[in-house]
Image (spheres, rainbow, N blue to C red):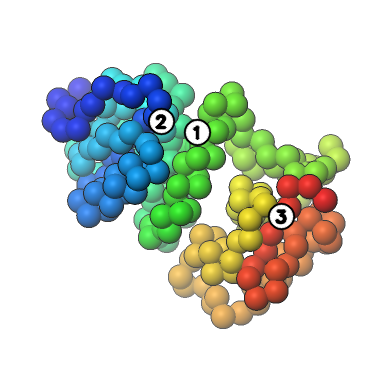
Amino acid sequence: MTAPPTNEVRPPRTDAMRILIVEDEVLMLRSLAKALREEGYSVDTADRGGEGLYKALTFDYDALVLDVMLPELDGWTILERVRAAKTTPVLMLTARDASRDRVRGLDAGADDYLVKPFDLPELLARLRALIRRAAGQAKSVIVVRDVEIDMRARVVTQAGRAVALTAREYGILEFLALHRGAVVTRTTLYEHLFDESEDTGSNLLDVHVSSLRKKLGADLIATRRGQGFCIEESA
Ligand code: CA
């Protein structure tokens, strides 16, 4: 342990999910904590890696929100040490343009990641999904009709048959499947799947969606004119 707990360690409430946020950017930390409390979560915070690790190992959280770049200990180190001891779901916050971070994070046992800057509703949705998944024996497979998406292996099968997807296609499919039943706007997809350097004025997204439809059937991903794309729960 490199640091004792210093603030906001409260006894867990039995009626609330308890979340730990480890983030050194004070404004981000405060606004996240406030938003999560408004959602009814019990929230602990840490603004340094040592304190974050201490709390993550000492208390039983329903999920961790873990920034990558932190003083004392970085998010990777914390993730590794937590994973050695616990199965607490971890949502990593990575910097933009750090796509290697995402791969590293998922390899190291992170359950999900968000690229900064992110939308708050997005973070809340991911967190709910993480907690739900953890509750259902850490299921990492999404099933939509006859399509199965294994998010750990990043493998997609349809009716038991493996479907080869490019990384981009997989990213789009996984994102839509994680938000199934909801319309995902083009802007959201671009923000979460493409780097700033890429030409988002092009029809890149349509090209990938069209390719996904060829591989998985025309009706899996619906287009909502003027809004975005949607995977329905059932046909
Ligand atoms: Ca940071």
* Local crowd size for mark 1, using a 10 Å CA cut-off: few (<14), some (14–19), many (≥20): some
Residue 17 numbered mark, or none: 2
Image quarter for residue 44? top left
Task: Identify which residue, 24 or 11, lies in the foreground.
Answer: 11
Task: Identify which residue, 125 or 110, lies in the foreground.
Answer: 125
Q: Identify the residue at image location x=38%, y=48%.
A: 93
Q: Identify the residue at image location x=26%, y=22%.
A: 11
Q: Give the Cα distance between marks 1 and 2.
A: 9 Å
Residue 2 can be seen, yes or no: no
Amino acid at dot 2? Met
Residue 17 in percent (x, y) is at 41, 30
Residue 153 in percent (x, y) is at 64, 37
Task: Identify which residue, 192 or 145, lies in the foreground.
Answer: 145
- On screen, residue 51 versus residue 220, left or right, reads left
The residue indicated by pointer 1 is 131
Q: Decide: is 118 above or below 45.
A: below
Q: Tell whether label 2 touches label 3 (CB within 8 Å).
A: no
Q: Tell whether label 2 touches label 1 (CB within 8 Å).
A: yes
Q: Give the Cα distance between marks 1 and 3.
A: 21 Å
Amino acid at dot 3? Ile
